[in-house]
Image (cartoon, helix red, strand yellow):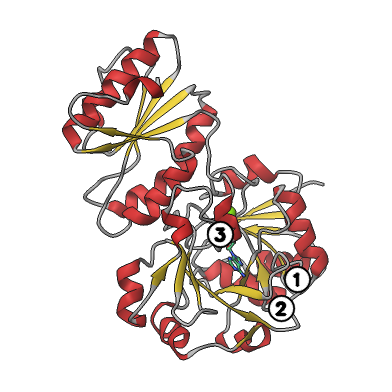
Amino acid sequence: MKTIIKKVDPGSPDAEVIEEAGRILRSGGLVAFPTETVYGLGGDALNPESSRKIYAAKGRPSDNPLIVHIADLKDLERIAEEVPGNAKLLMNEYWPGPVTMIFQKTEEVPTETTGGLPTVAVRFPSHPTARALIRAAGGFVAAPSANASGRPSPTSARHVKQDLDGRIEMIIDGGSSAIGLESTIVDFTEEIPVILRPGFINYEMLSEVLGEVKVDPGILSEDQNVRPKAPGMRYRHYAPKAPLIVVEGERGPVTEMIRTLVGKAAAQGKRTAVLCSDETAAFYENAANSSVMVSPVGSLEKEESIAKHLFGQLRIFDENNIDIIYSEAFETPRLGQAIMNRLLKAAGHTVVRAEGPFAREERYE
Ligand code: AMP
Ligand code: MG
């Protein structure tokens, strides 16, 4: 299959492109499109055959449900039963926007779309191109992130092409994603709403609207026996090809420890990279020799920049055939939980704490 790529002005997409993409979706094909979070891989959410194609194109396990995207609030009742009052409060505040809500599904939603679950995840994106496309497709677009399963989520059309070229009918190129991390997921099928995946809409913002909110223990625990409720959170995800080691602690010991580890890896002839903040990049410039790739991902003073560039940076390490990556931890105040959730999954939870003498250092060389 030849994948057509169409560039649009993301704020005001060409009507002809949207029409063509809508036709593809209505006839059961797949179209990748920009949203404010990451690029989505869209198919008709009410067509089981389209959902099967999404799983096949991504190489995604079929028990990992898709998010259904809508572009009109009144369409919610066709796919969701029992929308509680507090979910409506959250919609008033943050829809359209980067938050996904889980409800009991109606008969209309095929279980192929929900990974066999009796519940459905729904999002109403704010991105003008996404909204136009959803309308053109008939109102219900199932769209997981448009990456090959296990790879970092795509934040540009180029990333989508890297993973899905020749596997889908069309990619709509609307430039780079504004947020760069997938939506926050909140489960409204429990008495008290539960955060299943942290995102740009953070715990504080949710509590302010909802009062009591829980966090799924599965996303906080490193214990393999504590299973996250969102099936997608159980899989190894976001991972670059090279091993990634996160070093946490105070800035001084962290930079010192990464310098030491980088020096050793480089001395062994490994192509080594450091993922760091704009503020700390200079500490690593002369850490070993010129083969070290120092990669500032964004500013600690502007944490959205870290979120926006994280996935793209992980892909750059692959493109440069890096052998080993050492990363700082980005425990920033508002987005730290969402950023660290992705980074720790990319690292397979390999974390070293830098404090005093580097007792655990040897294990991670
Ligand atoms: P992606 O859009 O690629 O981030 O994948 C969608 C995410 O939403 C996955 O992590 C799924 O596990 C999660 N999800 C979708 N539907 C449900 C559901 N009904 N219950 C729990 N999690 C869900
Ligand atoms: Mg995904």
Q: Quadrant of residue 335?
A: bottom left
Whereabouts is ligand 2, in terms of quadrant? Answer: bottom right
Q: Residue 111 has which mark? A: 1
Q: Kindly report which numbered mark, 3 or 1, lies closer to the viewer in this rendering.
A: 1
Say which label, 2 or 3, has the lower sequence index: 3
Q: Nearer the viewer, residue 74 or 88?
A: 88
Name, please, the residue furthest toward the front. Answer: 225
Q: Residue 298 has which mark? A: none
Identify the residue at horizontal 42%, vertical 61% (top origin). 199
Disc 3 CB within 8 Å of nearest ligand 1 atom: no
User: Is label 3 in contact with label 1 (beta carbons under 8 Å)?
Assistant: no
Amino acid type, label 2: Gly
Disc 1 CB within 8 Å of nearest ligand 1 atom: no
Say which label, 2 or 1, has the lower sequence index: 1
Sort mark 1 into few (<14), some (14-19) or many (20+) by Cα contacts within 10 Å. some
Say which label, 3 or 1, has the lower sequence index: 3
Q: Kindly report which numbered mark, 2 or 1, lies closer to the viewer in this rendering.
A: 1
Q: The residue tagged with tag 2: helix, strand or loop? A: loop
Q: Residue 34 has which mark? A: 3
- Report which residue position mark 2 lands on: 138
Amino acid type, label 3: Pro
Sort mark 3 into few (<14), some (14-19) or many (20+) by Cα contacts within 10 Å. many
Amino acid type, label 1: Thr
